[in-house]
Amino acid sequence: MTTLKAFSTAFIFLSCVAFQAIKAQNSDPWLTMNQVMSKITSPTFKDKDFIITDYGAVGDGITDCSKAIKKAIKACNKSGGGRVIVPAGKYCTGPIYIKSNVNLHLHKEAVLLFSTHPNDYLPLVQTRWEGIDVMNYSPLIYAFNERNIAVTGEGTLDGQAAKDNWWPWKGRKSYGWKEGTPNQTDPDKRATLFEMAEKDIPVSKRKFGNGYYLRPQFIQPYQCTNVLLQGVTVVRSPMWVVHPVLCNNVSIIGVKVMSDGPNTDGCDPESCKDVLIKDCYFDTGDDCIALKSGRNRDGRRINIPCENVIIQNCTTRNGHAGIAIGSEISGGVKNVFIENCKISKPMWGIRIKTSSMRGGVTENIYMRNIEMDKIGNEAIIFTMLYEDKGPHIPTIKDVYLENIVVENGGKGGIFIEAYSESPIKNIHFKDVIIKNTQKPLKLTNTKEVTFTNTFIDGEKLLISPKLP
């Protein structure tokens, strides 16, 4: 534990120094983005293929191909790496563990059908669930402390989650739950994990799995370096879909996510460094993209931010927030660049959410060239009053938004609220246009908020408005 804390402290200090040095050289933060981009490189693999059908897989949609896929991955890894090919067909499988130097590559007409039987995802593995480390069911695709790994191709990853499996564990009738059946909201289930984290119970003793109803994530590389996810379509996830944790150098390119179940966030990099999310499509049952860094005491224990993140040319449809930062944000989020995205039909457009239980510092957030439409609630919302309260006052500062156009702003245009002892500060809006909103502007406990050429419902905002 001491080693991890020392590592995280040094990691944060050096990262901060390096970023500030780069920033000092470039008055334009978008030039800084280019330098961050130069550090994000996709892994490369040997030109050698391992076809799963050569190891016994049958693409008939019936045969269990778990062992064949495992054999192919093992052979690929043992030989120094390459591509594990999933050819055209439908292949039933349990969880897939990806080893170093392995690229799991799906043919355009290939479908991996993942089991919906919880016992298939045992034994327990170390994972992170809603921002807290735990021994739980294996994610559907998982890697732990591996290097140079990828999932690529034009095929489909199908979690087969539905109202008759996985989703009822949420405990809501709209997702198939029936009165009297157990679910994660029972007092001795989800809440037990949160209590153990607050008491610093070692992760190895936080054993969940059967009987606790904590759904597995779909794709989770944990503590990995050089990660690539490209081209695939991911559907019907039990929970969060793409969830890299404590990873460095992550590229998520051209991925399509469609899953309308409970908590099916599209892409949630958590405590990761040097991340590119580009040319992706999200139609989800929760936040489409959300940057995270651990929940409450457990997030502060590890204390590693999500930083140096670039989000480009992404499209979101439905979901809670189009692009979110938080709420599991106790380790902080910084140095984020978001540009050229289209957000349609979310409950919230751009959302930063934290609380005095989460804490954390959110800073150096840059957004430009974003189109939004059909917003349900607020188009742009930064809040410190999300969910539970505690003694850990968060910080939100240095956020820049430029060339943002919202056609239908929903219930609110720009909504910023903070604690009086920690105002949200240094927030700049330039060339922002929001149309058709019920409540244009609300600022509570803010400092140094400026508007340049910014209009809500045709009314130009003052450069520095008076606070309520």
Image (cartoon, helix red, strand yellow):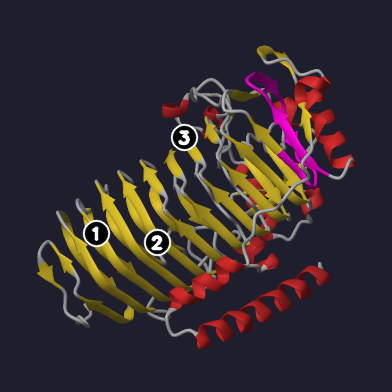
Q: Position of residue 268 (x, y in %)?
A: 55, 51
Task: Classify residue 253 as left or right of residue 219.
Answer: left
Determine the secondary structure under disc 1.
Answer: strand
Q: Main secondary structure of the magenta part?
A: strand
Residue at x 53%, y 34% (from the top left corner): 233
What residue is shown with label 3? 258
Q: Position of residue 182 (x, y in %)?
A: 59, 28
Q: Position of residue 408 (x, y in %)?
A: 19, 51
**Amino acid identity at mark 3:** Met
Residue at x 58%, y 60% (from the top left corner): 275
What residue is shown with label 1? 405
**Amino acid identity at mark 1:** Val
Determine the secondary structure under disc 3.
Answer: strand
Residue at x 81%, y 30% (from the top left corner): 72
What residue is shown with label 2? 339
Mark 3 crowd level (few <14, some 14–19, many ≥20, 10 Å Cα): many
C-alpha gap between disc 2 and disc 1: 12 Å
Mark earlier in primary sequence (2, 1): 2
Mark earlier in primary sequence (1, 3): 3
Disc 1 + disc 3, Cβ < 8 Å? no
**Amino acid identity at mark 2:** Glu
Chain part drawn in magenta: 81-103
Q: Nearer the viewer, residue 231 or 146?
A: 231
Is 98 a magenta residue?
Answer: yes
Q: Nearer the viewer, residue 164 or 348?
A: 348
Give the answer, above or below, for where 190 lies relative to 461: above
C-alpha gap between disc 1 and disc 3: 25 Å
Disc 2 + disc 1, Cβ < 8 Å? no
